[in-house]
Amino acid sequence: MSSLTKYLLEEKFYKTVVEDGSDIIFIVDYNANIAYHNPSVKKTIGYESLTGKYFFDYIHPKQLKKFKRAFKESTNLPYNSNIEFEFLCQNGSYKYLEFNSINLKHKDNIEALILDCRDISGRKQDQQELIEAQKAKEQFLANMSHEIRTPVNGIAGMVDLLSNTMQSKEQGKYLNAIKHSADNLKVIINDILDYSVIESGKVALEKIGFDIDYQVESVINSLELQATEKNLTINYQPATKNKMVLLGDPVRLSQILINLVNNAIKFTNQGGITIKLSFQKQNKKMAMVNFEVHDTGIGISAQKIEHIFETFKQADESITRKYGGTGLGLAITKQLVELQGGSIRVESKVNQGTSFFFSIPYAIGTESDLIHKSHEVNTGPKKKNKKSFAGLRVLLVEDNDINRLYASTILKKWGCICDEAVNGEIALEMLRKKNYNIVLMDVHMPVMDGLEATQMIRKSFTSPKNEVPIIAFTANAIKGEKEDYLDIGMNDYISKPFIPDELYNVIQKYYTPVASKASASVTDTPQANLEHLKTISDGNMEFVNEIITAFLEQTPPLLAGMQQACDQKDWVKTGDLAHKIKPNLSLLGITKLIPLVQSLETDGRSQQHTDTLAERVTTFIQGCQAAMESLKKEVNQ
């Protein structure tokens, strides 16, 4: 008899594995009553004996429903495995266990399970630490994004403002260099954030209808200026002359194409870039779309091309020094292609150019699925004739001086009356004293951040102040944050560095023209509030009457001059006359007309938004005349 056979016959195996093993062994009947457990119960969870106890009584309440389903499933299977649960220990704490089950019904016709339970607390702790590390990483990226985007926003904004002023050719060259540097910084930030989101598995792909030609041509339009600056051409060869509507994620497709075409422009000094499309129908519902991006650039050597899609790598370290970049662009591109079920490859020869080939399967859609209708295709960017936001009262809450200057300058050009606050606490105090039509709220600020301030406005203020539209005005860019802002009570979101057109479009959603409102309420006479005048004169009514009389005598000629200047389209003089009238309106408390006169002053002197100036001048003159009639009665009394 061999020693192994003898070992088995003497049941030493049973003692070693079951009695002395580290795993907890339970035998539990189908009703969850514990019939047996080995000594490891004492060592692992602290109990002397659980025999005769009800197994479910020891499962964490939050997991009980799910655990009962898994237990029931195990009674119908010969074996089950990897069922995680938390078990109540003798000391009142819970410990993570995982069981593998053997069903005795299938083996010995006994309605019971052998549960081999392993302590996985260490593993769960490691998982939790990984989750916490991931959260810390995401928070770091969010903070980094904010800290970098904030000064970049200031740089880009100041460049935009300067480029609208008179400048020499040499100054224009310097400004252009600054702009390119700021744009490069934005690309680097976006690459890092995109890579982080993809790496964490949080990319959610859309499935919406889009015209493939429209999508490609939009990418070309966005990069055409960049190519023209290097005397390069971008050519597009569509797959077919007919419209091809696909169902998928057009934003991610644009991102892939922008990365590849931008790369091609960067590494091409003469010649151009060609984009080709072809597709094969796999069936009536699906098509494989093949994309090619060819350039006539510097090319890549055979020994280095294999590393081109690797993270943080470029074909040559000298590339980074000469052309910049993070080494993430192509890694992100490859991941985005593969996330959509596609594949990508590259061919290249030194000094002869590079070609990228990628294919993505798309469902075939119809024209009714389109997010862009056919008449929008190939029309290029349209410049809208912007209306003035005359008299719109905006509270700009921003702690960065440069960003505040840039945003307020833009807002004032549009006719807004802009007040500023450097943190949420000051913003709340200003909102208590004044009414605003819209609040632009930065998120990260000292003393009180934008999120806390928004929650205070929504919960602590009364109507209508608690309903004021609040726009998150932030440098944060991590996916999912916009939803968080909306959840706490913000109405919309502007990402910094912001494009003025984006800010304009968001404000337009919440803007009701002041001129229209004033015109509609001309019959409601603008009232003078003389309390301020009485206060500063210590109640001297003779003095008050003198001021009113002077206003009644001096204002009509000013209004006549304003009307004449308006008729002659002399907008600067219109603004100057508005400036002369404005202090008197404040002194006499005719507050209803102040936003309107401020917009006339600002837009007239800057010759902005002149399309609505005549209408506003008419409304203003009517309001002043009505106010003067009211003041005449005051003097007579």
Image (tube, rainbow, N blue to C red):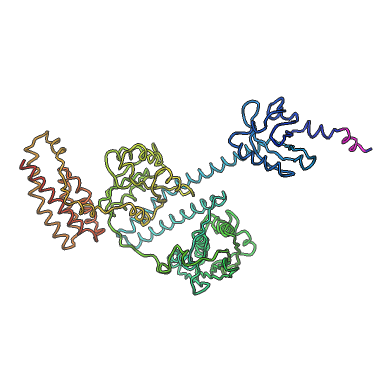
Choose between 81 and 527: the one closer to the eye.
81
Report the side of 550 relative to 9 (left or right): left
Name the residue at the left extreme: 636
Report the side of 252 relative to 539 (left or right): right
Horizontal and vertical percent position of residue 335: 58, 56
Name the residue at the right extreme: 1
Choose between 564 and 106: the one closer to the eye.
106
Tell whether position 5 is magenta: yes
Tell whether position 554 is magenta: no
Question: If the image is split into quadrants, where does the C terminus sit?
Answer: top left
Q: Is residue 100 shown above or below 581?
A: above
Instruction: Quadrant for residue 461, please give it.
Output: top left
Report the side of 259 relative to 421 (left or right): right
Residue plotted at (28% across, 58% down): 387
- Look at the image and give the residue range highlighted in magenta: 2-10
Question: If the image is split into quadrants, where does the N terminus sit?
Answer: top right
- Total labels: the figure holds 0
Residue plotted at (60% across, 62% down): 343
Report the side of 52 relative to 579 (left or right): right
Choose between 354 and 545: the one closer to the eye.
545
Horizontal and vertical percent position of residue 323: 51, 59
Horizontal and vertical percent position of residue 73: 68, 43
Name the residue at the bottom extreme: 241
Secondary structure mostly taken by the magenta-highlighted segment of the chain? helix
Tell me, yes or no, if residue 354 can be seen here.
Answer: no
Tell me, yes or no, if residue 103 can be seen here.
Answer: yes
Horizontal and vertical percent position of residue 210: 48, 64
Residue plotted at (16% across, 41% down): 529
